[in-house]
Amino acid sequence: MKTVKLSDHLKRVEARKAVLAAAGKLRPDEAMRNRGLNRTEEKRELLRRVEARAKAAGVSIMKAYY
């Protein structure tokens, strides 16, 4: 097994993002692949509360499915 420092990994991730952005292939919705079909009702309620608190604070959050 190969050990990788977190800082080195993050540098590679950022470099890859830069390459994708330059090629026009970086999707802002990349994290929304999971539609949440298998989420428990407790998790759905948690996401609703998070969204409500963010709206009350005037903070934008990433779109979530619930």
Image (tube, rainbow, N blue to C red):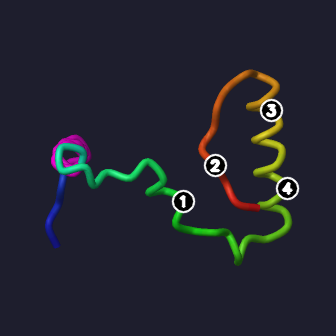
* Mark with earlier residue (4, 3): 4
SS for tag 2?
loop
For the residues bearing labels 1 and 2, Cβ distance under 8 angstroms: yes
Which is more foreground, mark 1 or mark 3?
1
- Which of the two marks, 1 or 4, is nearer to us in this view? 1
Instruction: Give the residue number, with chain letter if any, for mark 1.
Output: 32
For this orientation, the residue located farthest to the bottom is 38
**Three-letter amino acid code at the position of disc 1:** Met
Residue 65 in the image, given as x and y percentages of width and height: 70, 60
Q: In the image, which is nearer the foreground, mark 3 or mark 2?
A: 2
Disc 4, SS:
helix
- Which label's residue is closer to the chain start, 1 or 4? 1
Mark 1 and mark 4: Cα distance apart in space? 18 Å
Q: Is residue 38 above or below residue 41?
A: below
Asked whether residue 10 is drawn in magenta, I would say: yes
The alpha-carbon separation of the residues under discs 3 and 2 comes to 14 Å
Q: Please provide the residue range marked out in magenta.
A: 5-20
Residue 45 circle label: 4
Q: How busy is the neighbourhood of tag 3: few (under 14 within 10 Å), some, or many (20 plus)?
A: few
Measured Cα–Cα span from mark 4 to mark 2: 15 Å
Q: Which residue is mark 2?
A: 63
Label 1: how many Cα within 10 Å (few below 14, some 14–19, many 20+): few
Q: Considering only order in the chain, which callout, 3 or 1, is on the residue closer to the N terminus?
A: 1
Q: Amino acid at mark 3?
A: Arg
Is label 1 in contact with label 4 (beta carbons under 8 Å)? no
**Residue 23 pos. (x, y %):** 18, 50
Do the residues bearing badges 4 and 2 touch, measured as CB atoms within 8 Å?
Answer: no
Instruction: Sort mark 4 into few (<14), some (14-19) or many (20+) by Cα contacts within 10 Å.
Output: few
Q: Residue at x 25, y 49 (%)?
A: 24
